């Protein structure tokens, strides 16, 4: 493997790690917003009820 290939692999790895950090911070911000929202529990409960009703209809 040439030095150029090693540098290219290292650069790609660093870019991938940077993208993962950005995605993680975005997910953390979304999770914080959901925790702060008073509607989160109602929305999740509604989603569960709809899923149960949908599965009940299928069976």
Image (cartoon, rainbow, N blue to C red):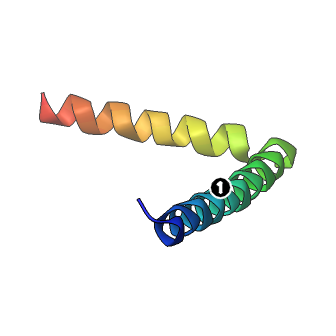
Q: Quadrant of the N terminus?
A: bottom left
Check disc 1 and report its element: helix, strand or loop.
Answer: helix
Q: Which residue is mark 1?
A: 17
Q: Residue furthest right?
A: 36
Nearer-the-camera pick, 41 or 18:
18
Q: Position of residue 46 (x, y in %)?
A: 53, 41
Q: Quadrant of the C terminus?
A: top left
Nearer-the-camera pick, 13 or 24:
13
Q: For label 1, count other residues whose C-alpha is less than 10 Å away and answer few (under 14), some (14-19) or many (20+).
A: few
Q: Quadrant of residue 30?
A: bottom right
Q: Is 42 above or below relative to 22?
A: above
Q: Indicate left or right for 55 with 18 as reference.
A: left
Q: Indicate left or right for 24 with 3 as reference.
A: right
Q: Indicate left or right for 35 with 10 as reference.
A: right
Nearer-the-camera pick, 6 or 42:
6
Q: Residue at x 47, y 34 (%)?
A: 48
Q: Indicate left or right for 10 with 5 as reference.
A: right
Q: Is 58 above or below relative to 16?
A: above
Q: Residue furthest left?
A: 59
Q: Residue at x 35, y 30 (%)?
A: 52
- How many marks do you count on the picture? 1
Q: Residue at x 83, y 47 (%)?
A: 32
Q: Position of residue 40 (x, y in %)?
A: 71, 44
Q: Is 54 above or below relative to 16?
A: above
Q: Residue at x 36, y 37 (%)?
A: 51
Nearer-the-camera pick, 26 or 41:
26
Q: Quadrant of residue 41?
A: top right
Q: Position of residue 27 (x, y in %)?
A: 69, 52
Q: Position of residue 50 (x, y in %)?
A: 40, 41
């Amino acid at each position: 493997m040439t030095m150029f290939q090693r540098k290219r692999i290292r650069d790609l790895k660093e870019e991938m790690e940077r993208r993962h950090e950005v995605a993680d911070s975005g997910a953390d911000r979304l999770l914080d917003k959901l925790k702060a929202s008073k509607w989160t529990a109602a929305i999740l409960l509604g989603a569960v009820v709809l899923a149960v009703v949908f599965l009940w209809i299928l069976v």
